[in-house]
Image (cartoon, rainbow, N blue to C red):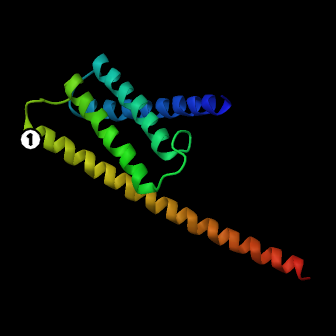
Amino acid sequence: MKKFFEGLLEWKRATALMFSASVVICAVIVLFTGETSIQISVLASLLVVSAGGTFLQQLAFTDYIIKEMRYPARMVVFLIPFAILLMANVWFFRWLPIESTVHWLMFSGIFLVVFVGGTISFEIYYRAMGKKYDGLLGQYHKQREQTVYK
């Protein structure tokens, strides 16, 4: 039960962060388009995407629910439901003209570019951090060897 509440708290924090970042990005876009306010329906849609997206991140990338799964499979577990969540929001909240194939293709293309870019960025970051920690671990082992054999 403790792990459930820890996961719930983590989800709430992540949702708040994602929602805040989404609102800031939306505000910048609204500013550049000449609008003076953000509609409540837009805020509601951002909250739905933030809550659903962070839940899917916890589902796919932590061991709260799925204990053992390879990373590529975890990416699929996140990608497909998140894409469906976003498309449902596009349709329900009318983020774009839903009859326009061109708009859907542009939305899908932007989604894929951002997803691939984010994935590559995280991969580079984690590899760099892994090398850093491998180096620190190597230094620790050398120091330990020197103190043991003195």
Find residue 23 and report its horizontal and vertical position in percent: 37, 29
**x, y (%) of residue 92?**
22, 23
Q: How many marks?
A: 1
Viewer-proximal residue, 59 or 123?
Answer: 59
Q: Is residue 33 left or right of residue 135?
A: left
Q: In the image, 64: left or right of 3? A: left
> Most extreme residue toward the right, as rendered?
150
Viewport quadrant of the C terminus: bottom right
Q: Nearer the viewer, residue 105 or 85?
A: 85
Residue at label 1?
A: 102
Q: Residue at x 15, y 39 (%)?
A: 104
The image quarter containing residue 146 is bottom right
Res 78 quadrant in image: top left
Q: Quadrant of the N terminus?
A: top right
Q: Is residue 83 above or below residue 144?
A: above
Question: Toward which corner of the image does residue 53 lie, by quadrant?
Answer: top left
**Going 30% across and 49% down the picture, which residue do you hit?**
114
Identify the residue shown where x is 82% and y is 74%: 144
**Residue ID at (67%, 30%):** 2
